[in-house]
Amino acid sequence: MKQFLLIPISILSLVTLGFVSYSNLAAISKALSEGNVAALEQYLDDQVEISILDQEDIYRKEDAVKVLKEFFSKNKPSAFSQVHQGASKGQDSQYCIGNLVANSGTFRVYIYLKVVNGKHLIQELRFDKE
């Protein structure tokens, strides 16, 4: 009897993890569309790889915030739309690809998240000019 209860509980846990992570992507998408670095900050891991056009580096969270603020000050966003999203098997990581429309043009944005201490956190954020 206990085995029969474990299966629904396991399925419910996976569904809940997926829902939480996809709601994180919705919040991240909203923050990107507004250029809201304070909202993005809560989803950044302690170290984040950020690539803006041809400049790529791994930053501590505090430095990543500065880099993102500078990017959004030069590229004021007006919209972000998700084009594709997916997750690895077991929900350990997920990604999102989208388009960020800014006053300086459109950027293709790649977001890679991984579970760290039970939370999906941004490991990589990439902005490429379309």
Image (cartoon, rainbow, N blue to C red):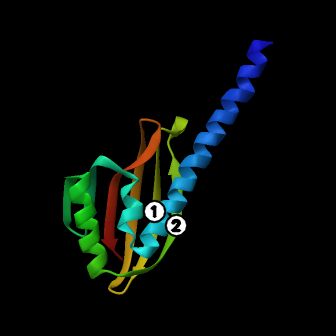
Q: Is residue 66 left or right of residue 34?
A: left
Give the labeled residue for mark 1. Answer: 97
Considering depth in this image, is 79 or 69 the residue closer to the camera?
A: 69
Task: Look at the numbered disc 1 and give the secondary structure of its residue.
Answer: strand
Other residues around mark 2 within 10 Å, as few (<14) / some (14–19) / many (≥20): few
Whole-angstrom CA distance, mark 2 to mark 1, is 6 Å
Q: Which mark is residue 72?
A: none
* Quadrant of the rendered image containing residue 4: top right
Q: Is residue 62 left or right of residue 104?
A: left
Q: Is residue 67 left or right of residue 106?
A: left
Q: How many marks?
A: 2
Q: Is residue 78 above or below residue 117?
A: below
Q: Identify the residue at image location x=51%, y=54%.
A: 24
Q: What's under tag 1, amino acid-wise?
A: Ile
Residue 128: x and y in percent read 32, 70
Marks 2 and 1 in Cβ contact (< 8 Å): yes
Q: Identify the residue at image location x=28%, y=67%.
A: 68
Task: Look at the numbered disc 2 and give the secondary structure of its residue.
Answer: strand
* Quadrant of the rendered image containing residue 72: bottom left
- Indicate which disc, 2 or 1, sits on the residue closer to the N terminus: 2
Residue 86: x and y in percent read 53, 51
Q: Identify the residue at image location x=40%, y=57%.
A: 111
Q: Is residue 56 left or right of residue 88?
A: left
Q: Is residue 130 above or below residue 64?
A: below
Give the labeled residue for mark 2. Answer: 83
Q: What's under tag 2, amino acid-wise?
A: Val
